[in-house]
Amino acid sequence: MKKYLLLLIFCFLLLECRIPVFSGYNESKIITESLIRDIFDLSENQELIESEYEIQPGDWLLKIAEKKYGDGSLWEAIALFNPEISNPNLISPGDVIRVPKIIEIEPEVIKKPVEDPVETEMPDILEIANFNSGFEENLLGGAFGVWDKDPDDITQSCRMEFERNITSTGYGYSLKLIYDVNSPNPAYNGFWMHLLGADFTPYSFLYLSVKGEPDAGFTDRFKIELKDTEGVSESFMLDGITARWQEKRIPLAFFKNIDMSSAGEFVVVFEDQVSSPKTGIIYLDNIYVK
């Protein structure tokens, strides 16, 4: 009974704080399968088929992914197979969903797709920022900095520093974000970075390395926003942040209303209703699309 009560409280907080949630996929079957193959990193002699799973009390997609694959981060693959699910945290016991299952196939029956000739070959990875220069310019030539909802309100702020001693690679710099949304007034702030109209259409995922500062404290979640050059924006709630470096992967398909051929801005948002604690330190490093 206590377990279900905690689940109901969590769902209420999601609605009350207006945290962005998964909104389903509208991509075609070919694009969807390509994304799922990337998620599972399938070899040439592996294929995906659909299997059915009946939702049990207390289940959500992350928990189902842990049951099926031993890795909760693969919940996004289940979501791609079930575009009718509007919120991965709110699914009903007794419903039957489709779950991808990996099978082995004989090498001789593998069908290799015929690749269309292309005029310009895009790189597999587009590096956006690694902060190693120690200057406020990313690898695309775009500026970056911090922002506050109300710069005149001294009860809320966000500052940034280049950190040499704490990096995901062991060399260069990372970016240290010192946030404070512990204000009697509505408070949110964060980090912005210009993308200068970069073409993200050849890529499937946005990657970034992130960790919190255990001594100062840190929120385990914050919002990522992408904007195109026309100012259209979409957001994604990045969670599961710990005191150790993690490389987080976000499907670009989540930002479905963005013109990915002309990416304009990458934004980090700390919100008073979401950040816990409301003051702390987050480190960012190595941002790229792949």
Image (tube, rainbow, N blue to C red):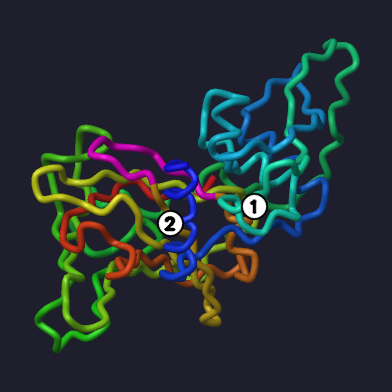
Residue 202 higher or lower than 2, as above or below: below
Q: Which residue does the image show at 27% across and 70% down from the upper left? A: 272
Q: Which residue does the image show at 77% across and 38% down from the upper left? A: 98
* Alpha carbons under labels 1 and 2: distance apart: 40 Å
Q: Which residue does the image show at 17% across and 81% down from the upper left? A: 184
- The verdict on residue 267 being magenta is no
Name the kind of residue labelled 1 in the image: Pro
How far across and down, in percent of the image, does residue 223 sit?
Answer: 40, 62
Name the kind of residue labelled 2 in the image: Ile
How far across and down, in percent of the image, does residue 196 sit?
Answer: 45, 70
Q: Residue furthest front?
A: 1
- The verdict on residue 242 being magenta is yes
The segment highlighted magenta reads 240-250
Q: What residue is disc 1 on? A: 202
Nearer to the camera, 202 or 209: 209
How far across and down, in percent of the image, does residue 136 sit?
Answer: 23, 64
Residue 141 higher or lower than 8, as above or below: below
Nearer to the camera, 230 or 28: 28
Q: What residue is disc 2 on? A: 9
Q: Which residue does the image show at 77% across and 28% down from the upper left? A: 48
Q: Residue furthest bottom?
A: 152
